[in-house]
Image (cartoon, helix red, strand yellow):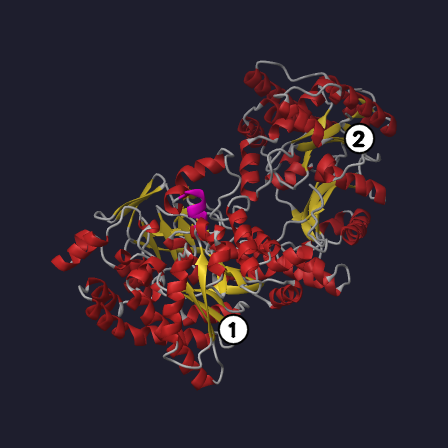
Amino acid sequence: MRYVYDFDEDSGGGRELLGGKGIGLVEMTELGVPVPAGFTITTDACRAYMVAGGDVPEGLDGEVDQHLAALEDHTGKRFGDEQDLLLVSVRSGAAVSMPGMMDTVLNLGLDDVAVEGLAKSTGNARFAYDSYRRLIQMYGEVVDGVDGHRFEQALGDLKSARGATQDVDLSADDLSELVGTFKEIYQDATGDGFPQDAREQLRRAYRAVFDSWNAPRAQVYRRTHEIPDDLGTAVNVVQMVFGNRGDASGTGVCFTRDPATGEKRLFGEFLSNAQGEDVVSGIRTPEPIDRMQERMPEAYEQLVETLARLEAHYRDLQDIEFTVEEGKLYILQTRTGKRTAAAALRAAVEMVDEALISREEAVARIDPGQLDQLLHPMIDPKAKIEVATRGLNASPGAASGAIVLDADTAEERGKAGEDVILVRWETTPDDYHGMRVSKGILTAHGGMTSHAAVVARGEGKPCVAGCEGLSIDYKAGTVKIGETELREGDVITIDGGTGDVIIGAVPLVPPAIDENFGTVLGWADDVRRLRVRANADTPADAAKAREFGAEGIGLCRTEHMFMAEDRLPIVRDMILAREEDERRAALERLLPMQQSDFEGIFEAMAGLPVTIRLLDPPLHEFLPPLEEATSDAMRDRIKQLHESNPMLGTRGCRLGLQFPEIYEMQVRAIVLAAKAVEERTGDAPLVEIMHPLVAFREELARLRELTERVAAETPSVAYLCGTMIELPRACLRADEIAEEADFFSFGTNDLTQTALGFSRDDAEGKFLTYYLEHGILERNPFEVLDEEGVGDLMRIAVERGRSAKPGIKLGICGEHGGEPRSVTFCHRLGLDYVSCSPYRVPVARLAAAQAALAETGVTAVAIGG
């Protein structure tokens, strides 16, 4: 197997073989862009190295020597030759861009003799010793793990002794002295002198870059961005060009458009008389790229022309690294530039206007997950933060506020205008009144589909759940976050997009939706097949969903209506009733309240379908904890309703069959509301009544009879009657159940629990975290649909359901309905719609469009490494 290719060779492979940086250098060479010469050690070599436990694959060192000889012939210089010295850089370059996560070594080939030769041949001793001290530090840190602070401390001490404010203020003699100091640090840390053999330096350097693929920071980055661990990195060995040869030299980083706004203008930074790491390390303060025009007008003009060529070639915003050596420009790297969501949208729209890309390509290249940046407040990217602890990123956005430990206090202080963060062990429906006025929610327990997470997403509030670094002492009114103890009223900040918890207030940036957002989503709507609905329980939720482009409600959870302050006492009267007559009397009092709720939702969604799920949770959830019971009757009832595993107990349709009067009241409220809205507005609501937790055909048959009997009391109201598919048996017997159903809606939150045998509240933050960290599972199945397991059950249900009833309507209403990969799966499965929280509707619209475009071959393409 061949492992090494020159930049001007045809490798027969793409970025998967040469890495992003390598393929970029190859393509720029073909375009005639000024690129230093060099060669790439492929990702195949890295993978072989990892499989062999850190042994270089046979033949690799020999190949590197051959290509190094060719590089010497090309440049007319010699590696390790003091008279006509070739120096190289060794740079990582994975197939998927991982900025700053892996290692680079510059100035390889210098030693004690060569540095003297470089000083003589260039007539610039300062440049030579500056390059050598940089090599010793970078090589020491990257190859031998020497603490970089030791080198920085020595540099700082020398500058202080010389009265120098910047590195460039040090003389050649100063830098020669610093080289000696750095060599002593290296010797002390490693027990060996700094290597004086250039080829030894090179061999050890590219091994170190291979090793950096598995550095902790790289592993964390890959987990965060879901990059496979087995890709490996390529290594690029590139002829050194020097930005530190004097005032006619320099280095910089620039973008073809502003990565924060998307504006079409040159954006970047530049440093004269510097090497690349100076720009990114903060050692010196870079200047705006425009200043380069004053200092090096010819190189600047060439840079502008080259950037335009590269953007036109790649047809996307480019992030470019460059060096100017004594007036001559070299491009070291180009890659697709990272950008904010606002910049991505603006750049896409303007590139369509410029005829650079098509509308379909514009839609395909927007990251759906990035849209959350535009819909919620975010931590200011410029803010310096210190994370105290971290939990699950359960609902996006960021918020700062005073800690409150109970919902009543949250409501009181929130209504008074104070920003509060509700901090709880876990939330229950009893906490809803406090959650809705809080700026954000932080819980020690619970997962991505816990009560706190689901409510927060529906309300558009940030939530960090399952935070194991959080402990609460309710009696003392204190919390411990990480190692810091705080009291109720102290201010914290949470970032629901990352799971970070920060002590104190942090600057936030407000959400920013502009016309580009609407333009791109409009283009998305033109190409998608899947319809997108919202999970909404109130008229306000429904209105917000329509604002974000929802085409109906796929899940209206009636239990949330029962938790309102004016209704809970009546609900409890119904539960405590000893006889059916008493229960019906309480339900009669609830009926007008339910009807009013439904009228508000039907009006908000005028002309669009509304799926209402009848009561699902077990009755004990509407009662207080046993120790808070206010009467003997309540205590007795709580004990009677207690179940060891209520999630699989008396809930859903089982509740409706045992206490049919509850579902009768709800169906009656639905049809009365539909009739009233039609008479008032002239528009007949599109009503869908959904029975939850059905496993057997007979369950749905009996509940359908109940629905039809009660609905017949209010003539001329059209409706559909269906069920939520959330149990494995329901998937397997979908053909039987379909005979009684007008529609299926997959409840993938519970289907995931029942298929995997995972309790979501007990799994997330506990064993599931272990599974993810140790590679037992690639993704959290409550965040991203488990296609092989849960997805296979869904396939069976779709096939069998449609075999019995070809026209049956099929959708999904779990939170997976707003997750891009899960939306893609639903598209492939042939579902009719997805439904998600209102703030995820734009994400789902875009993801559905991208799923449709992928079938035509239009996908986002990343360039560079």
Whether residue 553 is situated above or below residue 243 in the rendered picture: below
Q: Is residue 728 left or right of residue 520?
A: left
Residue at 80%, 46% (x, y): give it.
Answer: 299
Out of 23 and 813, give the one closest to the viewer: 813
Residue placed under numbered mark 2 in the picture: 5
Out of 463 and 510, give the one closest to the viewer: 463
Residue at 41%, 37% (x, y): give it.
Answer: 767
Q: Is residue 753 magenta?
A: yes
Real-space Cα distance between discs 2 and 1? 59 Å
Out of 586 and 170, give the one closest to the viewer: 586
Whether residue 73 is situated above or below residue 784 in the rendered picture: above
Residue at 52%, 34% (x, y): give it.
Answer: 775
| Quadrant for the C terminus in the image | top right
Foreground disc of the pair 2, 1: 1
Q: Is residue 70 left or right of residue 197?
A: right
Q: Earlier in the sequence, mark 2 or mark 1?
A: 2
Amino acid under label 2?
Tyr
Residue at 42%, 70% (x, y): give it.
Answer: 540
Corner quadrant of residue 557 = bottom left
| Residue 221 makes an appearance in the image | yes
Q: Which residues are magenta?
A: 751-758
Q: Residue furthest left?
A: 632
Tell me the SS state at disc 1.
loop
Out of 387 and 817, give the one closest to the viewer: 817
Circles 2 and 1, Cβ within 8 Å, touching? The answer is no
Whether residue 106 is situated above or below residue 23 in the rendered picture: above
Residue placed under numbered mark 1 in the picture: 608
Whether residue 181 is situated above or below residue 615 in the rendered picture: above
| Quadrant for the N terminus in the image | top right
Corner quadrant of residue 404 = bottom left
Residue 550, given in percent of the width and then of the height, sits at 53, 67
Residue 793, given in percent of the width and then of the height, sits at 51, 49
